[in-house]
Image: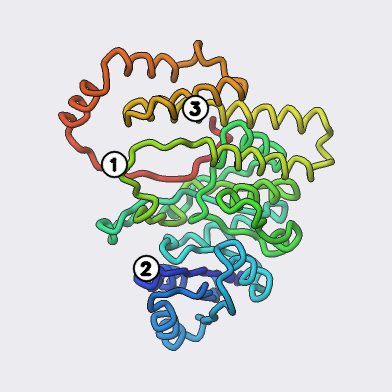
Amino acid sequence: MSTVDIVVPCYNYAAYLPRAVESALAQEGVDVRVLILDDCSPDNTAEVAERLAAADPRVTYSKNPKNLNLVGTANRGLFEWATGDYVVLLSADDALHPGALVHATRLMDANPNVGMVYGQALVFSNEQEDERAADVAEPQQTIIDGEHFLRLCCEYGNPVSAAAVVVRNKIQRQVGPYNPAFPHTSDYEMWMRCALVSDVAFVRATIGYYRWHGSNMSSAHYVDMRSDLNERLRTVRSVLDGATTLGQDKREALMTAARRRCGELALQSAAGLYEDGSPELMNACIAYARDHGVSVLGSRTWWKLQAKRAMGRRMISKLRSARPEIRERKFLGFCPETL
């Protein structure tokens, strides 16, 4: 039976911690261990974690000697504690879907060339605590050549939700720790580094649950994305600089694709910023798109922006308020091979 070590970094998420740990312990078909790593939380994380550890010998609790932030905490757990065949980094406010680990480990057991498996993550809120997705007995699986996965990450962005990933420990140790230079894109960088040394597989099923709450549930509908996009480009450049086997021409082509994708996303942000009444930020995002290789005037997003301008913000607001609210199930994570 495959062994899976699950690292659960926790900072001020005591209220969510039991569900995360229980979802890990409930996995069948694998031998699981769980490490709760408390990053000096000011809430009652220690009390909750100690209770969970006392209730099940598979759970260990440890507190960082000082606050290490998410990247430092993740690296401590993965490289100082984890020894299993496979590793999972599970946020304390997320959860695993039943059957997630057995689907992923069986695939990697049968395909030694695959270093990482990911699937879909069902988004839920605090008000949807009991939200569940049906299990799939034999989910469709797609193995993607590592270089091809890297290219699609540059062309489309990060296809992976961190709530739904299992990594072969041997590969994790080969590529090394998460990079603290990229606090917002460290997972994106990790997936690309894994793809440089192994193939990647996608399981077309729910693997995890991603909780939408608090700081990621902003009242503002749209944001200025330029800072995040610049970090994404620095991340891609860092990965490509280390991918010397690809050749200079191929690396520059991938970098150009990543720049263009960031330009496209900035233009999408501009269309939303118009609705929020932020013309200066809107124009800055349009300029960013132009600077990153997007032919603004000929794009579909540009024409959507012009249509919004023609209607005016007041009319758009009326149309949105008149539209009935439809709660749809939202999933993160997609197979770029299908694009």
Residue 134 seen in render = no
Residue at the location (31% across, 54% down)?
125
Quarter-of-image position of residue 251: top right
Q: Is residue 269 above or below residue 18?
A: above
Q: Residue at x 50, y 22 (%)?
A: 286
Q: In the image, what residue type sits under mark 2?
A: Tyr
Disc number lying in front (1 or 3): 3
- Residue density around tag 3, few if under 14, some if 14–19, many if 20 or more, within 10 Å: many
Q: Position of residue 245 (x, y in %)?
A: 84, 40
- Looking at the image, tell me whether mark 1 or mark 3 is earlier in sequence order: 3
Query: According to the image, label 3 marks what residue?
Result: 285
What residue would you read off at disc 1?
Answer: 328
Dot 2 or dot 3: first in sequence order is 2
Q: Is residue 335 left or right of residue 51?
A: right
Give the image location of residue 192, x and y in percent: 67, 46
Q: Indicate the amino acid at tag 1.
A: Glu
Q: Pointer 2: what residue? A: 16
Q: Secondary structure at mark 3?
A: helix
Q: CA distance from mark 2 to mark 1?
A: 23 Å
Element carrying mark 1: loop
Image quadrant in which you'd find residue 316:
top left
Quick check: marks 1 and 3 in contact, CB under 8 Å?
Answer: no
